[in-house]
Amino acid sequence: MQRGYSICWLLRAAFFGVSRSEQCCAQSPKEIANSIGMKLVIISKGTFKLGSPPGKEGVNHDERQHEVTISRDYYLGMYEVTQAQYETIMGDNPSYFQNDNLPDARSVEVTSDFPVETVSWEDAVEFCRRISALPAERATGRVYRLPTEAEWEYACRAGSKLAYSFGGDVRALGDYAWYDSNSNDRTYPVGQKKANSWGLYDMHGNVWEWCSDWYGEYPNGAVSDPQGPRTGSLRVDRGGSWDYGAAMCQSSFRGNLDPSGSNFNNGFRLALDAPVNPR
């Protein structure tokens, strides 16, 4: 029997036939680990409402709700990129929160598993380029990138139509996020809080996460696989951080920053296209 196929799937294929996209889904692993140990989770294609509905309290003008279709499966990092992973690829660690520079630390903490921060959008893109160029990654055909804004929100929501991936009750946010009410003015190791229902950690809080898009107004109608404006002056970041309030940690909240700018709030996670013909 071919690996990656269930008996039920094979029977269905024999009697009814399946499409190429279904074959891809049947074979793609739900989780992968790359050559430096980074874990990525497959995010299945689908359609959702991006943004916030009109009339919702606290909605910003730039969160106009519209239907978005993600037409292909993709992988997204289970965790934000850590300081150790960044240093392995880039040769340095620009993070503010490392070792003895933690405001509430009683002793020096090892911060290798903290999210890397103080990285610009340009730094994040260069990280993607360099890790993709590793011989072990080239051998697998993996080309890493930043997620689009639509991919990010789709994965963050994990099927939720409410303010957060876990629902609408802000009182539960502390179970899922490091934000201004519980962070003690610092970041924390990735993966300490609860994951969303698709297995992704720290999508709310800890550090803002760069997306690939230029910042701009959303379209009025339904779209498929949006890439954002063709040009702009600011890049999108998402998810809130240790230094921001609950409202800015909502799934739909949009941040933006100069692509060459960096501060101790901004990090990123990797995205990867699922192979068309996985093995």
Image: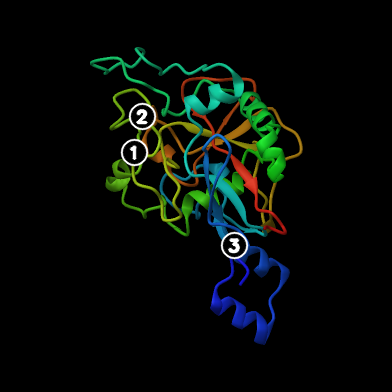
- Characterize the local packing of mark 2: few (<14), some (14-19) or many (20 or more) Cα atoms within 10 angstroms: some
Left or right: 204, with 49 as reference point: left
Q: Position of residue 179 (x, y in %)?
A: 35, 33
- The answer to which image quadrant residue 9 occupies is bottom right
Q: Which residue is mark 2?
A: 188
The quarter in which the N terminus is drawn is bottom right
Report how far apart the C-alphas of labels 3 and 2 lie in the structure.
32 Å
Return the residue nearer the eye: 71 or 21. Answer: 21
Q: Residue at x 41, y 33 (%)?
A: 206
Q: Position of residue 205 (x, y in %)?
A: 41, 36
Is label 2 in a helix, a strand or a loop?
loop
Q: Tell me which amino acid carries mark 1.
A: Gln
Q: Tell me which amino acid carries mark 2.
A: Tyr
Number of the front mark, 3 or 2: 2
Color theme of the render: rainbow
Is label 3 in a helix, a strand or a loop?
strand
**Residue 228 in view (yes/no):** no
Disc 2 to disc 1: CB gap under 8 Å: yes
Looking at marks 3 and 1 on the same chain, the residue that comes earlier in the sequence is marked by: 3
The quarter in which the C terminus is drawn is bottom right
Q: Tell me which amino acid carries mark 3.
A: Gly
Q: Is residue 44 above or below residue 269?
A: below
* The disc label shown at residue 192, or none: 1
